[in-house]
Image (spheres, rainbow, N blue to C red):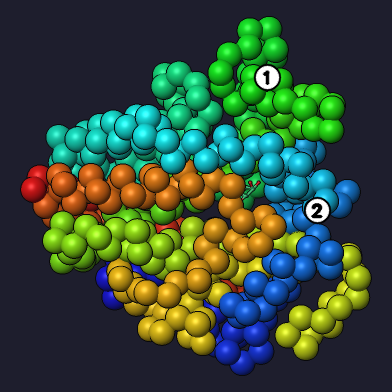
Amino acid sequence: MKKSTLSDPFKEARESKGFGEMDDQNDPVVMVLGHKDVRKCAHNWKTFQSGGDEVGRIVVPSEVHIRNTRQIPFEVDPPEHKSYRDLVEPWFKRPLEANYQAKLTQIINNVVDEALNKGTLEVVEEFALKLQSRALTLLLNIPFEESDLWISWGTHVFRSEDTALDGDKANILYDYIDAQIDKAIENPGNDLYSVLLASEINGKKLTKEEVKGVLILTFAGGRDTVINAVTNAIAYFADHPKSLQRLRDEPEILNTAIEELIRYFSPLTQMGRVVTENTHVCEHAIKAQSRISMCWASANRDERVFENANDVVLDRKVNPHVAFGFGTHNCLGATHARQIMKILLTTLAEKVGTMEIIKCKENIEDLDEFKRKVGFDSIHVTFNKL
Ligand code: EMZ
């Protein structure tokens, strides 16, 4: 098996019963596995709730013990959700602007040049984390230098090497955001903090806590997900030099190739919901106040929807993947993430001839019944110039 392969541990359960079960800190989760069921649950926000009193409970692993601030708009249900979403949406669509793309191209060019000059490097820390943090300065519209600090935090703001939930680490992020909010109050600029602080919903200014909620989501939600997507892309093209050549020969497939890689990688395995009433999923009874999750990674390998679901088909025509979620809460950062992938693939095709994986350590998520490889803890790769 190639090093870049991400297999589908959910197949058996998905095809035989449609769901799986895992224990998460003594708060069980029924994992919905089929594409159609996942979309149905994501659509039904009344029964499968994102808001509710227990902030952080929809995340798997649950963040109730390490977070009190509600992430916005992610942990708010309709109808309130819409006002928040409408407010932040235009800002998160800025990656479509030429000026933004030019700056992002420069950031990615530099990271790729650094790799080519170095020759061999560890891609998670020295490539993907750097790229993600530097790109985040554009999304927040703050000085580039700030990324040095974020890079020093490592790949996940809530997880550390020996624990899936690290409260001390999370506090570093919360304190940092609090301080940045205070700075923006004193000295407003054109950054996301200042823009949010100046915004109103229904004639009322956003509170500091609300601004913090948007910022925590921006920092946490787009961190390991982007890092996994970037790292997996490097591993994939290292293993498949012909695919990189194909991007050079047929640049018109770029957009479909990106969607296909994102489907295949599914950087976010699942997202939970709290059930508001006794109900059924896949003919399985679910009690009110318990949790389900929509397993995007499993839905994206559903053979009823994707032919040869375990293959990367770079020009796959119909690709209704749910890697960015589905429905009300579909990923706010998707525009930024897609631009990162687009510019990354273009730059690799332009500058890199071949890449060789020297050694790697897989990042395996332990979901009880299922063990899912979501990427790498570390991966050493040699980059060769074109
Ligand atoms: C949450 C989540 C959002 C969560 C798109 O996903 O990402 C996770 O990595 C965070 O831990 O808090 O932001």
Q: Is residue 41 visible?
A: yes
At x 48%, y 47%, the residue is 335
| Residue closest to the eye, 86 or 143 | 86
* Residue at 42%, 68% in the rendered image: 264
Across and down, in percent, residue 330 comes to 62, 56
Q: Which mark is residue 181?
A: 1
Q: Residues within 10 Å of mark 2 (few under 14, many from 20)?
A: some
| 356 displayed left or right of 335 | left
Residue 290 percent across, percent down from the top left: 84, 67
Q: Is residue 27 left or right of residue 212?
A: right
Helix, strand or loop status at disc 2: loop
Say whether marks 2 and 1 touch (CB < 8 Å). Answer: no
Spatial CA span between label 2 and label 1 = 27 Å
Query: Of label 2 and label 1, which has the lower sequence position?
Result: 2
Q: Kindly identify which residue carries mark 2.
A: 78
- Could you tell me how many numbered marks the image carries? 2
Q: Quadrant of the N terminus?
A: bottom left
Of the pair 100 and 137, the residue shown nearer to us: 100
Circle 2: residue type? Pro
Type of amino acid under label 1: Ile
Where is residue 17 drawn, in percent x and y?
A: 66, 89
Q: Quadrant of residue 98?
A: top left
Which one is in front in this view, the residue at disc 2 or the one at disc 1?
2
Outermost top residue? 186
Residue visible at 45% across and 18% down? Answer: 143
Which residue extends farthest left?
386
